[in-house]
Amino acid sequence: MPFLYQTKVQPDWIDYNGHMQDAYYGLVFSHAVDALQDAVGFDAAYRKRTGCTIYLIEDHKFYLREVREAEPLLVTTHVLASDSKRFHLQMIMTSRGAEVCIGEFMELHVQQQPQPHAVPMPDEIQKRLEAARDDASPASWHRLRSRPFKQL
């Protein structure tokens, strides 16, 4: 079950070459993660109630195509794997049907106080991530893959 996030390229994201600056691909992916975390239960109420959140601990991106101001962007997020504290995402950013950027992200569930440290996710959120997991074999995942993450 992929998660979808849509936006468009903003004027202030354009660099001196006339296309979206590389840093903003990461911003778009980050907003897509925000949408996923709200959908699975890591929303603002959860963060306030528990003092827990998610941290990005590793990411890899493949830049495939330039995009220009006002172009539509769609990010499709797949949960590749998860365990009690982490989840591994693959995101495919497209514009008008063409792949623009592929990213992989490892997220960690963190208790922020007294010092940030990894803690297990609540069972109900872990079950939602597991239910959303892409059950296809790793061989069928997108052809552009980062170096393998340590197995979950």
Image: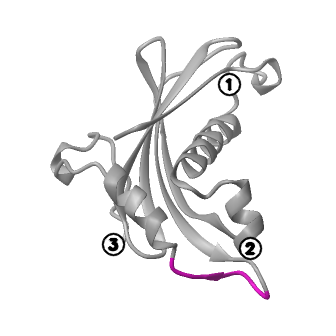
Residue 59 x, y percent position in the rendering: 53, 56
Q: Which residue is mark 3?
A: 152
Q: Which residue is found at the position 76% from the left and 22% from the top?
A: 14
CA separation, marks 1 and 2?
35 Å
Q: Is residue 117 magenta?
A: yes
Query: Percent position (x, y) of residue 49?
Result: 74, 69
Which image quadrant: the C terminus? bottom left
Q: Quadrant of the N terminus?
A: top left
Q: Is residue 66 left or right of residue 133?
A: right
In the displayed structure, would residue 56 be above or below residue 32? Answer: below
> What residue is shown at x 48% (from left), y 63% (from top)?
125
What secondary structure predominates along the stretch shown in magenta?
loop
Q: Nearer the viewer, residue 105 or 13?
A: 105
According to the picture, the residue beneath numbered tag 1 turns out to be 20
In reply to whether residue 32 is colored magenta, the answer given is: no
The residue sitting at the bottom extreme is 114
Residue with the mark numbered 2 = 51
Give the x, y percent position of residue 144.
33, 42
Q: Nearer the viewer, residue 40 or 58?
A: 40
- State whether residue 4 is above or below residue 71: below
Q: Position of residue 67 (x, y in %)?
A: 59, 18
